[in-house]
Image: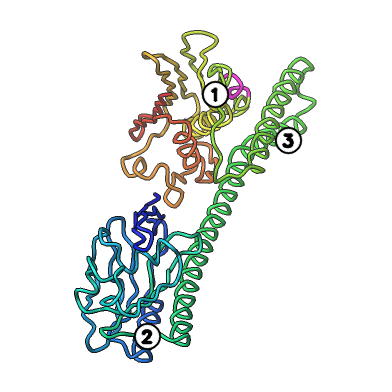
Amino acid sequence: MERYSRVKIRETREFKTVKISSQLKPELIIPVISKWQSLLDNVAKILQVPSALIMSLKEDSIQVFMKSRTDGNIYEVGEEAKLIYGLYCETVIGTQERLIVPNAAKDPLWRDNNPDADLNMISYIGFPINWPDGEVFGTVCALDNKENHFSDDFSNLMQHIKMQVETDLNLLTLNKELNEKNSQLEQQIYLKSKFLSLISHDVRGGIGTIHEFLKLLTADFDDYDRPYLKMILNSLCDNAESLYQTLEGLLQWSKNDLIHLEPEYTPVNIVGIFEQLLIYFNQNLVIKDLKVSKDFSSEKVIVSTDKNMLTTILRNILSNAIKYTGKGGKITLRITQLDDHHIIEIEDTGIGMNKSALDFLYRYDKAHHEHGTFGESSAGVGLMLTKDFLNKINALVEVKSKPGKGTKFKITL
């Protein structure tokens, strides 16, 4: 969030609005603060002045961020002055130039309405301090209780301090940006890995089923009549086509910027997705002799959502329903509408889950790794990815399950 301050340039009596340190700026670490403290202590001793300060500009005030540990330094860390006087530091920040005031007591411009002069800090030298993007941090300055014209050597020394402080601010900013980029890279790698897992999870089962059927056909080829063979081969062809489309979609996703992957909303037929998934899982359903009950209000139920994400969600849930339902069981697919919401339910009569399994249902490290009723393996990533996509398309999910009684997923779009 951007923050601004309004400072007064005393020489021209104009006010200037400047952008100040935002909340996104990096924190000042202890080694940097220690370095600045040493610089202030040394410059105060070299200049033989009671006060050397680093000031921090706030929205309505300027604050002593750091002070030299010298005798006679009347300022305290954290001490603030309101931006109503046109202070020395306000002019430095407003003009973005060096300011030298040899003796405010003799200078009509600085003599009156000057809190620093009232404290007998009549001499001043200061330089602006900015972040690398131009946001104002504050100033570095030195003040004296006697007239002081600050020689060129002293001025060069103060400018060197300014450059050192701004270099540190730049390094802190670069380090923060590097850490953020590393974090983004780690997240990118993590998401790429998740998508590879998704490809494995969604495609492996289909390929395995086709492979098993083909082995069965080749082993007992002569025992089947031509009509039956044609029916099986047509079914395998449909399954392979569905598998190919699934793989194409996943590979296309893998080329995208997965961190910023956003849903593409289009009219989607939920019934059509279910029909394609039943073709995709046809062999699994036949092998386990599972009955599928379809409770749809019509042949087309249209919603506005991301088709690929919704397909992946329903495919993973239906895959688990088939996997964890025993031979001869039943799976119910239901679509209903309540006001402007569509409710999708996938219910099975499978082995179910206890409360502990439900609590960790969407976590990869403690996911539902139990083998299916026919020994099917589990990659442990399907429901984790399902939850990600549910969040992206703003869908709500509710799961009810009891051991031995089956499981019901209820999705509200």
Looking at the picture, how far across and down is residue 171, in whole percent? 50, 70
Identify the residue shown where x is 67% and y is 43%. Answer: 255
Identify the residue shown where x is 37% and y is 55%. Answer: 14
Q: Nearer the viewer, mark 1 or mark 2?
A: 2
Residue 276 included in the magenta stretch of the image: yes
Q: Which image quarter: residue 40?
A: bottom left
Looking at the picture, how far across and down is residue 211, in whole percent? 70, 36
Q: Nearer the viewer, residue 14 or 98?
A: 14
Residue 297 included in the magenta stretch of the image: no
Q: CA distance from mark 1 to mark 2?
A: 80 Å
Asked if 313 appears above or below 367 in the picture, the reply is above
What's the residue type where badge 2 is placed?
A: Ser
Q: Is residue 401 left or right of residue 145?
A: right
Residue indicated by mark 2: 38
Identify the residue shown where x is 62% and y is 27%. Answer: 280
Residue indicated by mark 3: 215
What's the residue type where badge 1 is placed?
A: Asp
Tell me the element at label 2.
Answer: helix
Q: Which residues are magenta?
A: 275-279
- State which tag comes first along the sequence, 2 or 3: 2
Looking at the picture, how far across and down is residue 158, in whole percent? 43, 81
Q: Would you call the spot at circle 2 few (<14 residues within 10 Å), some (14-19), or many (20 or more)?
A: few
- State which tag comes first along the sequence, 1 or 2: 2
Label 2 close to label 3 by CB (< 8 Å): no
Q: Which image quarter: residue 347?
A: top left
Q: Is residue 147 left or right of residue 269?
A: left
Q: Nearer the viewer, residue 397 or 304?
A: 304
- State which tag comes first along the sequence, 1 or 3: 3
Residue indicated by mark 1: 289
Q: CA distance from mark 2 to mark 3?
A: 79 Å
Looking at the picture, how far across and down is residue 259, in whole percent? 55, 46
Identify the residue shown where x is 35% and y is 82%. Answer: 37
